[in-house]
Image (spheres, grey):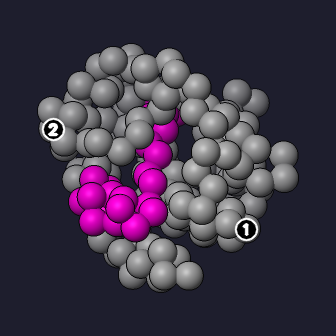
Amino acid sequence: MASIYDFKALRNNGEELDFADYKGKVLMIVNTASKCGFTPQYKGLEALYQKYKDQGLVIFGFPCDQFAHQEPGDDAAIAQFCEINFGVTFPLMKKIEVNGDGAHPIYKYLKGEAKGVLGSAIKWNFTKFLINRDGTHIQRFAPTATPESLDEKVAALLAE
């Protein structure tokens, strides 16, 4: 695969999402979990999404249960949790793996394009990938990077 736009993934409801449909948008892809110390970041992610969605930001939450079993629910339970507790309206995807042989292809690509502290592995829940409008520049941010701390970076990419 040559770019983020070559990938497809399943939405939380089972519908296929084609990333090619998001050309020209700034994308943020985040592996999420409902029972993690970073789970309150859902609030900040939703706030960032609401602030910038009309300017071209799209956030994708990819639930993952690979870190201390912190996302035990099924897709319906995850969607309900996110809506009730954090009012999440950005696209939630089907639960996936982000590390190992079973890692979703989009995560294999992202990890290869933007290495982190552990090389290509995802360190923990709420690792964030920020992708510019033409899909050519991918930045990786640690779970400790709050959505609020990324506001200026998102704004700068949207202004490009």
Residue located 47% across and 32% down the image: 93
Mark 1 or 2, which is nearer the eye? 1
At label 1, the amino acid type is: Thr
Residue 18 makes an appearance in the image: yes
> Viewed as shown, does residue 47 lie left or right of 14?
left
Q: Work out how far the residue at label 1 is from the one at label 2, CA to CA, in angstroms.
A: 34 Å
Using the rendered view, name the quadrant where residue 6 is placed.
top right
Residue 58 tag number: none
Which residue corresponds to mark 1?
136
> Viewed as shown, does residue 126 lie left or right of 129?
left
Callout 1–callout 2 Cβ contact below 8 Å: no
Q: Over which residues does the magenta segment extend?
A: 45-67
Q: Residues within 10 Å of mark 2 (few under 14, many from 20)?
A: few
Residue 85 tag number: 2
Residue extending farthest to the right is 2
> Does the magenta run of residues contain 54?
yes
| Residue 56 in picture, x, y percent from top left | 45, 63
Residue located 84% across and 53% down the image: 2
In the image shown, does 117 or 24 lie closer to the viewer? 24
